[in-house]
Image: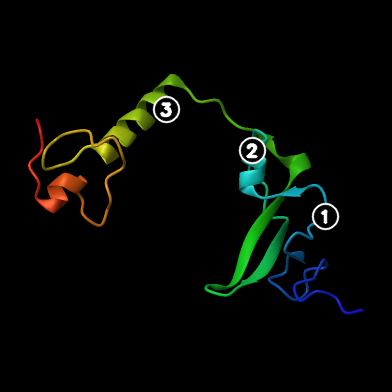
Amino acid sequence: MSLPRFWDPDGTRYGGIPTYPWQMAPDGYMTRRQLRAVGLRPGGQPVAAQILWQSRRLGVRAAYLYRRGLAQPVRPMTPAKAAALALAMRARRTCPDCRRDAGYVLPTRYGTCLPCADGLPTAA
């Protein structure tokens, strides 16, 4: 039986860190998104392992893994951070031409709301 292509638990072939194929990482390792889903963050720890897989469109892809045992709880959102985030999101939704809140994040392709990009009159 041959081993999968990206099987390197010793870290000798792929960048010096343990490497596993898709869906074959051992228990106790999680990606940033998996940590966040359970209310944790890497907390300054270095990357402990990686998952490599072949993508038809993008070539070899990588996902970095962290040890769950060393992860720390996510810092709580403070009122100041929540207010700053709300202001930033409002700025991303406000059309610079008609000055209205479009209700969606403006496409960077146009830089304006869709009615302004199409040259349609907007109700003020």
Earlier in the chain: of badge 3 and badge 1, it is: 1
Residue 51, labelled with which disc? Answer: none
Quadrant in which the N terminus appears: bottom right
The answer to whether residue 20 is above or below residue 33 is below
Q: As rendered, which of 56 and 42 lies closer to the eye?
A: 56
The residue tagged 2 is 37
Q: Nearer the viewer, residue 36 or 111?
A: 111
**Helix, strand or loop for disc 3:** helix
Task: Report the quarter where the C terminus lies.
Answer: top left
Residue at the disc numbered 1? 26
What is the three-letter code of the residue carrying label 2?
Ala
- Residues tagged 3 and 1 counted as in contact (Cβ below 8 A): no
User: Of the residues under marks 2 and 1, which one precedes in the sequence?
Assistant: 1
In this view, the mark in front (3 or 2): 2
Relative horizontal placement of residue 2, taking residue 19 as reference (left or right): right
Query: Circle 3 sits on which residue?
Result: 81
Q: CA distance from mark 3 to mark 1?
A: 36 Å
Residue 112 shows in the view:
no
Identify the residue at image location x=43%, y=20%. Answer: 79
Specify the quadrant of the image occupied by residue 121: top left
Q: Tell me what residue is drawn at x 76 percent, y 65 percent.
A: 20
Is 92 placed left or right of 18 in the picture? Answer: left
User: How many numbered marks have been drawn onto this rendered protein structure?
Assistant: 3
- Neighbor class of circle 3 (other Cα within 10 Å; few <14, some 14-19, many 20+) is few
Please tell me whether mark 1 sits on a helix, a strand or a loop: loop
**Residue 72 vertical position relative to residue 52 in the rendered view, above or below:** above
